[in-house]
Image: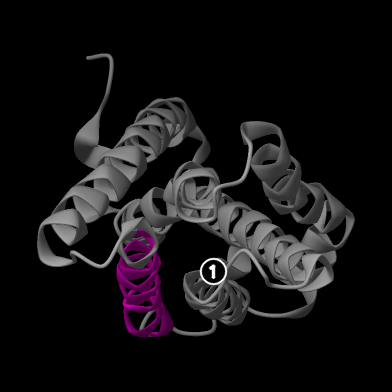
Amino acid sequence: PLIDLGVLKIATFRLAHTQGSLFRATTYAVPFVLPLMMQVGFGWSPVRAGAYVAAVFVGNLGIKPTTTALLRRFSFRAVICTATTLLAITMLGCAFLNADTAPVLIVALLVVSGAARSVGFTGYGTLGLADVDKPELRDANALSTTLQQLAGGLGVALAVLCIATASRVWSLGELPVYRATFVVLALLTIATVPLVWRIGPQAGHRLKS
């Protein structure tokens, strides 16, 4: 078979693609919702909105050199939970942005968001393969890639669903719709933390031995 679901019996792989998929979905939704909020809610031009959103990817790339050191120094559980919590906080922060917010505050918020996003992605991606034996790596990689792509698509669909639902509830203008969407995304993101915490501090220790 092209994809073997048998690798899901591995606890760390399964967690990385259940809670991890929800984390990826909500994370992928941010670069979709954010420029829409800035253009529709703030009245900014697409160029201005895109320039601010680029700060997310500055944080994403800027944290990369230290991610491996973080995973070696701390447990996967601690790194993933911390990154997830920070990401949820920045999503809530986005819900309180407006057109008059100081540019430096917006950029700082989005850089932290991008850094948390990157650390979370790397943490989940590494943990997912930590306990996979060599004969199963091919099947694990194939399924992992498929689920990650699916999570990306689901993230956009989730964002659209939140915006559409909020539009039916709020009649105060466009901005509250996007604020409500960010609050929902933050709540879904933080909901994964208790589940990840249950895996224990020794999860993925094979990579450090």
| Between 76 and 209, the one nearer to me in the picture | 76
- Residue, x 47% and y 42% (percent of image)? 32
Q: Report if residue 190 lies within the magenta region.
A: yes
Is 55 on the left or on the right of 192, as rendered? right
Question: For numbered disc 1, what is the local secondary structure?
Answer: helix
Which secondary structure dominates the residues rendered in magenta? Answer: helix
- Residue, x 69% and y 62% (percent of image)? 110
120 to 7, vertically: above or below: below
| The residue positioned farthest toward the left in the image shown | 168
Q: Quadrant of residue 172?
A: bottom left
Image quarter (top left, top right, bottom left or bottom right) of the C terminus: bottom right
Q: Quadrant of residue 119?
A: bottom right
Q: Is residue 132 visible?
A: no
- Residue, x 40% and y 80% (percent of image)? 193
- Residue, x 79% and y 78% (percent of image)? 73
| Between 28 and 65, the one nearer to me in the picture | 28
Q: How many marks?
A: 1
| Between 62 and 56, the one nearer to me in the picture | 56
Find residue 192 and report its horizontal and vertical position in percent: 35, 73
Find residue 77 and report its horizontal and vertical position in percent: 53, 78
Q: Quadrant of residue 171?
A: bottom left
| Between 5 and 125, the one nearer to me in the picture | 125
168 to 85, vertically: above or below: above
Q: Is residue 55 visible?
A: yes
Find residue 140 and report its horizontal and vertical position in percent: 41, 35
> Where does label 1 land, which residue?
94
**Magenta-tinted stretch:** 178-197
Give the color scheme: rainbow, by chain, secondary structure or one colour. Answer: one colour
Q: Report if residue 192 lies within the magenta region.
A: yes
Q: Which amino acid, by three-letter code, is at mark 1?
A: Cys
Q: Local crowd at mark 1 within 10 Å, few (<14), some, or many (≥20)? A: many
